Image: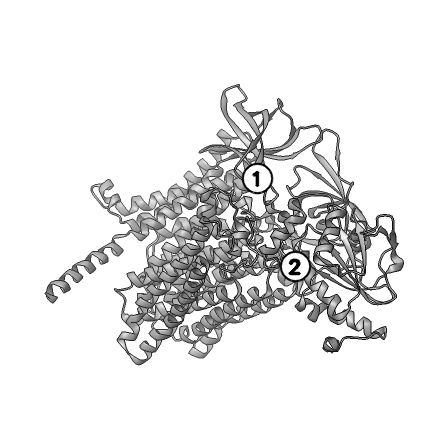
Amino acid sequence: MSVKIRTLVLLTPLVLFLLLAVFLFKGLFSDPTKLDSALIGREVPSFELPDLYQPDVTHNQSIVGGRPMLINVWATWCPTCYAEHTFLNQLLAEEDVYIIGLNYKDDSRGAAVRWLQDLGDPYAINLFDFTGLLALDLGVYGAPETFVVDAQGVIRYRHVGDLNERVWRTEVGPVYYRAMQESGLEIPEHRMELLE
Amino acid sequence: MNPRRKKRLIMTSSILVGAAFATGLVLYALSQNIDLFYTPTEIVQGKGSEAVKPEVGQRLRVGGLVVPGSVRREGSGLTVAFNLIDVGPAEITVEYEGILPDLFREGQGIVAQGILVAPNRLQASEVLARHDEEYMPPGLAEALKGIEHVPPSQQNYNQNYNNEEAAEKGSGGGYDR
Amino acid sequence: MIGEVGHFALALAFAFSALLAVIPLIGVARGHGGQMAIARQLTYGMFIFTLISFIALVWGFLANDFSIAYVANNSNTALPAIYRFTAVWGSHEGSFLLWMLVQASWAAALAIFSKRLPLVFAARVLAVMGMIGVGFYLFMLITSNPFERTIPLIPVDGRDLNPLLQDPGMIIHPPLLYMGYVGMSVAFAFAIAALLGGRLDSAWARWSRPWTIAAWVFLTLGIMVGSWWAYYELGWGGWWFWDPVENASFLPWLAGTALMHSLAVTEKRGTFKSWTVLLAISAFSLSLLGTFLVRSGVLVSVHAFASDPTRGMFLLSFLGVVIAGSLLLYAIRAAKVKSHSRYDLFSREVLLLGNNLLLVTATMVVLVGTLLPLVHQQLGLGNISIGEPFFDEVFMWLTIPFAILLGFGPLTRWKRQKFAELRNSLLLAMALAIGIGFALPWIFADVVSGLAVLGLILALWIVFTTVAELRLRVASREHKWPALVKLGRSHWGMVLGHLGFAVMIIGIAVVQNYEIERTVRMGAGDTANVGGYEFHFRDMQERQGPNFISDSATFVISRENGNHVANVVAEKRFYTVTRQIQTQTALQVNPFRDLYIALGEELDDGSWAVRIHVKPFVRWIWAGAILMSIGGVFSLTDKRYRLRRREEKKARKQAAAEAL
């Protein structure tokens, strides 16, 4: 065999490795926690849940829709939710994002209320889902999770894990603001780029 | 044929035969042992755009949440049955005989592997709790890394709210299963 | 303060590795001896500062310095001191620091023991070690700094170590495993240095052989301890799960085993040169791949965990540069290498080639089984899982030809072997193996299991051919026993390694086919009969441990004829800080069987689900692995390597005398 042919033969391991690397690379960016919710494109399931602050007040699916919003699933037992909370406050303060909080299977109403009092309350409405009923209907696997719902009450996107600047910029924000744009609502100047 | 050629021919052909045999063996074993992953909804309504439902008798894996209140033990034995759900409303029943993993709990995500004995009934041979420490293989339990989302300074704060569960959930890293 | 010292030392170690990667190579290019020779000093610097960094972290743990985030996440004041020490490698960052320490130690050892090598070659080898170091140190400093601070909010107490890791097995498992993993980088460095120099002669094979064997010994022991740990700590009664993380350690082992044998051929016969180089590259590449798989979270197993994409990205880039670079270098340089040696179809060369091909096939099988789910998913074909039966089945079929060849190999001469010379010994070995293989289960077991018989025959075949080989070697000698002793440690290393493999096959074949497992519902006072033993559940007590509370069940084990065997305690522990439940199995062990009790959950009426296993010969699996490692150690201490050292000493003395 000439040297040239031998070189080609000996290149096989390299080619095999590169092929493998492509898959590893793709695998790295397909988030294993990304779950395709069968609910995407459907309306938020019906529910009836008490308010977190006032046990005798109940909310139902009518609070969803009318404008684009986020539904954020959280709990005090979830450390990641704590990390996420600052960012949610920031979303409310700086971009006036409308968020419904779904307190998921918390240990007590008291702990949840205390948490919001201490850390600030970024939520427009607070739902208290002690048994995890709505969360079950939504197919929530854990906390935190965030759903983007458009003005028609249809779920547009689901994010598993915490929201942070990166996730907001690359994944959740664009979906939310597109829904805002469709509804003709105002979008903060510095977030216009997310629509591109 | 000269002896060198002949030798080379024998070696090359035996390597080729061996390779073919090995490939065949691997493919055969794969075809026997690949388990597709379903969610309860996919089992009931079918999977993918063509809504392919698994057949009764098929070996598969199913992952979902244990429906609260559905866990029941049957008789004096160790048979346990529970329902699994994902996005609802479809539920399937899983039957299992044996010891459930330490982290098995109602409302928790689990994976069951077994044989479908009825359109919505699985006879499980193995039940794994998601993020189950018991499942964790040797190596260095790297599964426990990933605390980067929560600096411990904040962790401490968490415990003020709830000493009991913060740490446990914390070990799940950025995403608590 | 100690955190900053550690961090700074790590940065210095990085600086040393960067210099090490560059300066010696410049020296080689310019032919500047001083620049080449400085490689040693740079290596020592890298090692010392890594050691300082490691000690700093250990100090942080022992002093309960919760201002270090990593300590706060993995330790607790209630944790016993020994586990506070092992908690250093209890999670990602610290275990990587340990990894680096091991890497630097290998490099330092190389620097010490490479004085005999030509300076140019030693400089290249150490430079390659430096390059590997650059990537790893950068990875640590950028994505996984173990010295990150919790300031200003320093926690009062830490979050405790994962209960599963609070175990003696975990004290030694990671260091051993890393010694093996990283040790493969030495063989890799030799191969790359040889490729860089363009001289793929048998010299590099001779030099890298002891290093490869040493790394292989560590890897074998590391995997063995891991398997043993999983066996009693996970409470499942299994000793190997074919989990991605286990496979990650098994892949370099398979490649390393092939490399070890191929190196022997290259050293002794000068053939298979480019093949050996490829194996050396592969063994280390697979170590790296394993690290990537384990630490990037790219493989979704049931214990899917949140992962940091930057870490994965970094490791993958590093993987790409190292592996693709070396494979490219390989393709360019190895093409020019020609083998001259001639050998017949029936010769040791060909048998070893067969052994290599089978090992490589096994490597491919594990690789496919581990990565196929990922590829399948990426191709959009949905989620799949590949079960243990896949691996079990394929490995069973691969073991058969492997064991048969293994029996032939040592008996066969290099270059050419007349079959007729061996026919009688081989036929005798075969007859004995088959006869005894059938007889043993028939005498001792109630049922004769086909697979167990097959396993026994293969193992006995290896044993008898090994005996035949030893007989052959001393056949012409007058005094047989002294001649046997004189055979040389390297030879005995081979014999022990092969016997170890046979012992392991026996263990696997018997335990897989004769194990008895029963899950029963038991309350205090109940008795269960399993496999000829009576397990009496005497009582259940609550016990307070240092950082856990446990439900301890005492079982009285006796033979069915009433003879008392032992009292054992099985526990269900609840770790109060991590809030984790952990099963502590009860074991009663003798060389021929393990009695294994694991508590399940408590049932409504106060009774417990209990799983009882009777596992015959399961110890033999690990005993086999230990025997193989001892074989490796024997080879390492062979006269060839020791003689040289003595000569060296003599030479040095002479030089000193001359200088005077």
Chain ID of residue with mark 1: C
Have a look at marks 1 and 2 and say if they share a chain.
no
Return the residue at label 2: A83
Up/down of C613 relative to B49, above or below: above
Q: How many marks?
A: 2
Q: Is residue B131 visible?
A: no
**Farthest residue in the top direction?**
C562
Q: Quadrant of residue C344?
A: bottom left
Which residue lies most toward the bottom here?
C30
Residue C192 horizontal/vertical position (percent):
39, 69
The residue most toward the right is A62
Query: Which residue is drawn at the image coordinates 75% and 54% (left, top)?
Result: A140
State the image coordinates of residue A64 (x, y, percent, origin top left). 86, 61
- Mark 2 belongs to which subunit? A
Q: Quadrant of residue C32?
A: bottom left
Which residue is denoted by mark 1 in the rendering? C235
Q: Quadrant of the C terminus of chain C?
A: bottom left
Q: Where is C98 relative to C8, above or below?
A: above
Residue nearest the observer in this picture, C380 or C362: C380
Whole-number angstrom distance, CA of label 1 to CA of label 2:
35 Å
Q: Could you tell me which quadrant the N terminus of chain C lies in?
A: bottom left
Q: Which mark is residue C25?
A: none
Q: Residue at x 29, y 49 (%)?
A: C489
